[in-house]
Amino acid sequence: METITYEYGGGLYVNLTNRCDCACVFCLRHNGHRGSIYAGDLWLDHEPTREEALADLLARDLAGYPEIVFCGFGEPTFRIDDILWLVDRMKERAPGLPPIRINTNGHANLIQGRDVCPDLQGRIDVLSISLNGATAEEYVAVTRPRDGVRAWEAMLDFTREAVEYVPEVVMTIVDKDKSPEEIAACRALCEGLGARFRVRSYIED
């Protein structure tokens, strides 16, 4: 049975893909995990269709959650068009829908080969973007993106533009092996882009 939606911290999370263009050093998937310590096995043997995902979502009391989060085991913006379709359908069919968040590495425009930011307006309420470093060198070392430094630049450009279309844009880092000076540098970079900064705690296996 595929895990398309799952609950964590009171919210409803949506798992649409295993695909990711990064190999972050702290990611659970590189330590032999097929899922998440939060929700069991999230590895998808097949990606759900948008119709399958919608049916799974509508089977839940969506208005009863504080938020709906597109996250899961891969980078959700590989399926950004399906996410936007799902949000539109939920808004049509589920009155009182809670805020919608996407947890992302910020590479959507790079992955899709087009500017997706305008499409987020009126659909996505919160973006949580993984920053993970204050310099291109640190970012590439920690995140190990397939596009190297180009991915760093794409993430910054995406964040800078997204604040024009999404009410709340947050950039996060994981505190593992980060000095106070490095955290301060990340905060300054984030706030310079117009986003809010958040430090996430590293979770041991």
Image: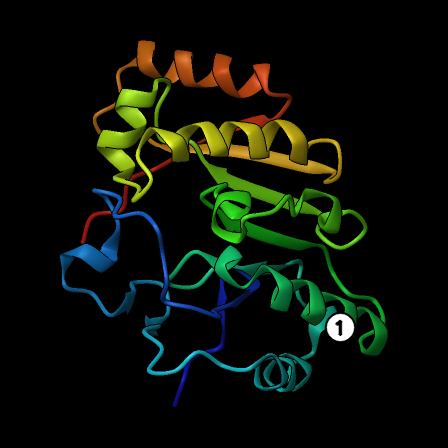
Q: Name the residue: 80% across, 75% down.
A: 94
Along the viewing direction, whichever of 147 and 27 lies nearer the viewer: 147
Position of 102 with respect to 121 (left or right) is left
| Residue found farthest to the bottom | 1
Among the 4 quarters of the image, the one containing residue 153 = top left
Residue identified by numbered label 1: 90
Q: Secondary structure at mark 1?
A: helix
Q: Name the residue: 62% across, 26% down.
A: 160
Q: Name the residue: 66% across, 31% down.
A: 161
Among the 4 quarters of the image, the one containing residue 137 = top left
Along the viewing direction, whichever of 198 and 79 lies nearer the viewer: 79
Residue 119 place in picture, x, y as percent: 73, 51
As drawn, 145 above or below 8: above
Q: Amino acid at mark 1?
A: Met
Q: Name the residue: 42% across, 31% down.
A: 131
**Other-residue count near label 1 (Cα within 10 Å), few / some / many at <14 / 14–19 / ≥20:** some
Residue 168 place in picture, x, y as percent: 68, 37
* Total marks placed: 1
Along the viewing direction, whichever of 51 and 116 lies nearer the viewer: 116
| Residue found farthest to the front | 113
Position of 30 with respect to 57 (left or right) is left
As drawn, 162 above or below 195: below
- Position of the N terminus, as image quadrant, is bottom left
Residue 191 place in picture, x, y as percent: 57, 17
